Amino acid sequence: MWDEGAGPLWGDEGLLRDDAEWLRQALGLSEPLIADLLAWVRDMDAARDRGQSQAPLNPRAVHLTERVRTEVGSRFRVRFHP
């Protein structure tokens, strides 16, 4: 889920850290996926800053959701919240 000025991933208790090392160690995400998640957040922020809709970036978010789901397996429940 994207939220203004926040990272890409949330847990039951709120925003998860967006530090690459933490994402790798705590969640087991790969470097390419981490880079793509953080790039998506930057692109969402940029669209907001330009006054553009972020909706065109939703298909990319859905794809990232599937990648996260694949990498974490059954350890976590993963869903996209637009």
Image (cartoon, rainbow, N blue to C red):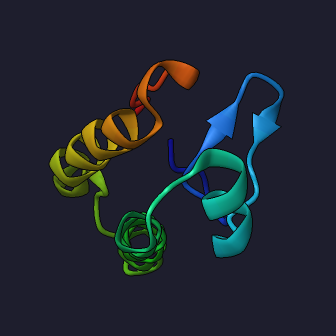
Q: Is residue 19 above or below residue 79?
A: below
50 or 60: which is nearer to us?
60
Q: Position of residue 62 (x, y in %)?
A: 24, 40
Question: Does residue 59 show up?
Answer: yes
| Left or right for 66, reference 9 | left
| Left or right for 54, reference 46 | left
Q: Residue at x 75, y 44 (%)?
A: 15
Q: Residue at x 29, y 48 (%)?
A: 61
Q: Is residue 35 above or below residue 60?
A: below
Residue furthest to the right in view is 13
Task: Tell me which corner region of the image, top left, top right, bottom left or bottom right, holds residue 70.
Answer: top left
The tally of labels here is 0
Q: Position of residue 32 (x, y in %)?
A: 35, 73
Q: Is residue 68 above or below residue 52?
A: above
Q: Position of residue 76 (x, y in %)?
A: 56, 23
75 or 17: which is nearer to us?
75
Task: Tell me which corner region of the image, top left, top right, bottom left or bottom right, holds residue 48.
Answer: bottom left
Q: Residue at x 47, y 78 (%)?
A: 49
Quadrant of image for the C terminus: top left
53 or 13: which is nearer to us?
13
Question: Does residue 6 show up?
Answer: no
| Left or right for 4, reference 29 | right
Q: Residue at x 54, y 54 (%)?
A: 8
Q: Position of residue 55 (x, y in %)?
A: 24, 49
